[in-house]
Amino acid sequence: MEAGLSYKHILLTGPPGIGKTTVVRKVYEKLKEYNTIRTKGFYTEEIKSGGKRIGFDICSLDGRRGPLARISGGGSDGPRVGQYVVNLSSFENLALPALETDNSLPTVLIIDEIGKMELFSTCFRQSVKEQFGRSPSLKILATVPVRSRGKPLSFVEDLKKRNDVEIYVVTKDNRDEVVAEIAEKLVSN
């Protein structure tokens, strides 16, 4: 971190399967120990059948759950990412309310993830953009995909360039150690 610069938001990045969602969930559990901060948001979870990944669910921190994407079954409607078809209506019905915050209490907003599937939703993009501009009482912990050889996601690249964002690259070596450090940064002023 540059001298004198105070980061407000934290973005976790790293290759698929490295443990970004696990770090987010562990930070969330640690944040629950603090009575002075509220948490809102969602995380994503792989769905497997017979040991094979068949899709992803979105899980709100208040316990609601629904499909984000599933392997295409022929005539499935919706945007596609590789072999998956994104269920935009399910995603928006769960994600958008999970992103609603007010300024009355210090809040950590958890967004796992801001990726290709999620960014098909114009409403989601707008909500994320608004939340990153909110009052000092709101801090964001989000995961973003690592920049691949393909075309980068301009929305994600713009978030990474913000001067109030600190980026953590999650690795096998650091994924357990960063949990307490990230939680402490999110609760400190």
Image (spheres, helix red, strand yellow):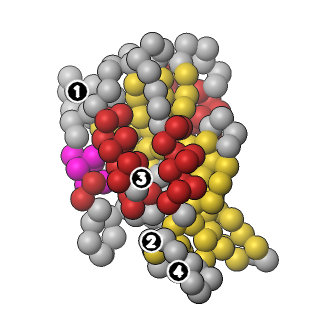
- Magenta-drawn segment: 156-161
Q: What's the CA distance linking mark 1 and mark 3?
A: 24 Å
Tell me the residue at 57%/84% (across/down): 75
Q: Nearer the viewer, mark 1 or mark 4?
A: 4
Say left or right for 158 vs 114.
left
Residue designated by label 2? 79
State which tag comes first along the sequence, 1 or 3: 1
Residue 130 is marked as none
| Amino acid on which disc 4 is placed | Gln
Residue designated by label 1? 5
Tell me the residue at 61%/71% (across/down): 70
Residue 5 lies, in percent from the top left, at 22, 27
Q: Nearer the viewer, mark 1 or mark 3?
A: 3
Secondary element under disc 3, as helix, strand or loop, is loop
Q: Marks 1 and 2: CB-CB under 8 Å?
A: no
Residue 114 is marked as 3
Q: Nearer the viewer, mark 4 or mark 2?
A: 2
Secondary element under disc 1, as helix, strand or loop, is loop
Residue 83 is marked as 4
Q: Eyeballing the image, is 50 above or below 131?
A: below
Q: Marks 4 and 3: CB-CB under 8 Å?
A: no
| Amino acid on which disc 2 is placed | Pro
Q: What's the CA distance linking mark 1 and mark 2?
A: 39 Å
| Amino acid on which disc 3 is placed | Ile
Q: Quadrant of residue 3?
A: top left
Q: Residue furthest right?
A: 50
